[in-house]
Image (cartoon, coloured by chain):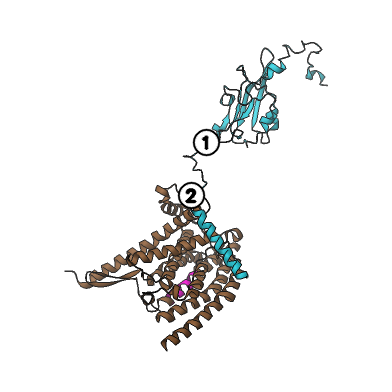
Chain colours: A brown, B cyan
């Protein structure tokens, strides 16, 4: 009979492998889903040549990116240029560690939480990493020695200070209501009713901030194809660009999961098993991201700053005060 | 008021994209699905024949003069009966821009455009079409038109044998 700790270690390894594989394939197929959905919104089919219904397209894209020349600008800062895409991809990947994606499983007589690491400050971990991710973009733009890339990273930083505060503030009511920073605790606090219904203003502010955090339309100011070529990744090619790209899409999945965990009740839902509910909700929010990209034009970055500081932050602040007061009253 | 208008405008935009998503795409999936070109579509150039089966081209060089990219070249020759024809006729389709000016210039309706648009090729030299590649056994548009039937050949060999006609001048004769 195998010792107990070996079984645990194997189970943990399987879980880690499962999460990593799911996250990467999820990101790859999110790209395909986005291209297909955007295509349909523009009355075209989207990629449908590689494999049945174009389902092998992510593979073809990966092969293409790996085969491309890895170009480094002559006067660029080589070390930073090397590190930046890694920061973007790795911070996106490891954020998923704290996200609980299902109710605890019982396997071989032991409790197996479906979360890589249930930190008691999971929320702060997420906020910290989401701020770190901007370093990838800022350094990548800086190291490229290109005016467009530099403009892109300046814009990324300007964007960061516009959405970060309102995002943090919109989470405070959730923490107040759940009385915990642990994401598992937060999900468990929504067993009966999701926080999106209890506190819609926080939900909306968080959703908009998350859209800005993902750097996608209408807040794709750091990339802004038609203004600054491709923004921070103008000079990147091949797999280095691929890392930024994968990072962006993993980020979309993670932000969708965060919305699900914080406001939509995570894995809680009637009838279906928890995991299905969780992924269904994540896909719904991811669709919202894509839908928004197909619908809204880009903001100018002064408009985003105006919106962030003069609209979102006051709403979020007021919401914190009101929620706190109500909770205090209920506590009596 | 502004807020309501803003919300309404945003919601409408979302509604339109959602609705459009369920409409049939307008894409024509090319290799499998081909579009029927319009009758006056301007694609591959051909040389047509008159109703009697003779070549319509009289090698007047008007098409090559009209061609903005200079892709048409030819060598004029004269048959025994005085009828002009092109000894060789060459269109370089790597240069042709399918503007149709050659067909407008042609006085005998010889050079015409067809709707065959699939002429891409791996070897550019294969796109240089000679007269045998260009000439078709058909009258094309305007099937009854026959230039020589209207004009007559009207010249005899050797030159200068017609009424009111002087023998051709030897240009080298005028050299100092």
Same chain letter for marks 1 and 2: no
**In the picture provided, is A192 more to the left or to the right than B156?**
left
Above or below, B118 relative to A210: above
Check if residue A134 falls in the magenta segment.
Answer: no
Above or below, B66 relative to A44: above
Q: Nearer the viewer, residue B65 or A202?
A: A202
Image quarter where the C terminus of chain B lies is: top right
Q: CA distance from mark 1 to mark 2?
A: 27 Å
Chain on which label 2 sits: A
- Which residue is the site of mark 1? B121
**In the picture provided, is B154 more to the left or to the right than A82?**
right
Image quarter where the N terminus of chain B lies is: bottom right
Q: What is the secondary structure assignment of the residue under circle 1?
A: loop
Q: Nearer the viewer, residue B73 or A97?
A: A97
Q: Nearer the viewer, mark 1 or mark 2?
A: 2
Q: What is the secondary structure assignment of the residue under circle 2?
A: loop
Check if residue A126 falls in the magenta segment.
Answer: yes
| Residue A235 visible from this viewpoint | no
Q: Nearer the viewer, residue A88 or B8?
A: B8
- Which residue is the site of mark 2? A45
**Residue visible at 56% across and 70% down in the picture:** A159
Q: Residue furthest left?
A: A1
**Residue visible at 45% across and 48% down in the picture:** A48
Q: Residues within 10 Å of mark 2 (few under 14, many from 20)?
A: many
Rendered image quadrant of residue A193: bottom left
Q: Which residues are magenta?
A: A124-133
Rendered image quadrant of residue A99: bottom left
Residue A148, position in %: x, y? Answer: 59, 62
Rendered image quadrant of residue A75: bottom right
């Amino acid at each position: 009979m195998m010792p107990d700790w070996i079984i645990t270690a194997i189970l943990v390894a399987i879980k880690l492998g499962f999460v990593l594989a799911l996250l990467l394939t999820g990101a790859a197929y999110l790209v395909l889903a986005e291209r297909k959905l955007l295509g349909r919104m523009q009355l075209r089919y989207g990629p449908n040549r590689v494999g049945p219904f174009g389902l092998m397209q992510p593979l073809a894209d990966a092969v293409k990116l790996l085969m491309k020349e890895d170009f480094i600008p002559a006067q660029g800062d080589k070390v930073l240029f090397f590190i930046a895409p890694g920061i973007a991809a790795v911070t996106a990947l490891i954020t998923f560690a704290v996200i609980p994606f299902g109710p605890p499983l019982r396997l071989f007589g032991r409790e197996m939480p479906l979360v890589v690491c249930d930190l008691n400050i999971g929320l702060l971990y997420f906020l910290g990493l989401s701020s770190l991710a901007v370093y990838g973009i800022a350094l990548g733009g800086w190291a490229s020695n290109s005016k467009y890339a530099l403009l892109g990273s300046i814009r990324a930083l300007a964007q960061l200070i516009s959405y970060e505060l309102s995002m943090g503030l919109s989470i405070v009511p959730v923490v107040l209501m759940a009385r915990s920073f642990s994401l598992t605790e937060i999900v468990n606090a929504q067993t009966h009713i999701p926080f999106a219904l209890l506190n819609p203003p926080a939900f909306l502010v968080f959703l908009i901030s998350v859209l800005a955090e993902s750097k996608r339309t209408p807040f794709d100011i750091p990339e802004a194809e038609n203004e600054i070529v491709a923004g921070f990744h103008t000079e990147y090619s091949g797999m280095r660009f691929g890392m930024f790209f994968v990072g962006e899409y993993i980020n979309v999945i993670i932000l969708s999961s965060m919305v699900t965990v914080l406001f939509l009740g995570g894995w809680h839902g009637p009838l279906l098993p928890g995991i299905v509910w969780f992924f269904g909700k994540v896909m719904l929010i991811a669709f919202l991201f894509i839908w928004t990209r197909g619908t809204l034009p880009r903001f100018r970055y002064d408009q985003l700053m105006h919106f962030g500081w003069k609209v979102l932050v006051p709403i979020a602040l007021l919401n914190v005060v009101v929620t706190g007061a109500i909770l205090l009253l209920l506590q009596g | 008021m502004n807020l309501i208008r803003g919300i309404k405008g945003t919601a409408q935009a979302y509604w339109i994209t959602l609705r459009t998503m369920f409409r049939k795409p307008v894409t024509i999936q090319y290799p499998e699905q081909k579009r029927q070109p319009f009758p006056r579509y301007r694609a591959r150039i051909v040389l047509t024949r008159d109703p009697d089966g003779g070549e319509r081209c009289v090698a007047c060089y008007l098409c090559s003069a009209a061609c903005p990219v200079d892709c048409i070249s030819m060598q004029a020759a004269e048959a025994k009966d005085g009828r002009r024809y092109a000894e060789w006729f060459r269109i370089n389709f790597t240069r042709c821009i399918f503007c149709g000016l050659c067909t407008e210039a042609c006085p005998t309706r010889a050079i015409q455009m067809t709707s065959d648009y699939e002429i891409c090729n791996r070897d550019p030299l294969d796109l240089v079409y000679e007269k045998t590649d260009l000439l078709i056994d058909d009258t094309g548009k305007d099937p009854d038109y026959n230039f020589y039937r209207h004009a007559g050949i009207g010249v005899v060999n050797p030159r200068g044998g017609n009424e009111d006609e002087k023998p051709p001048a030897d240009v080298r004769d005028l050299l100092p």
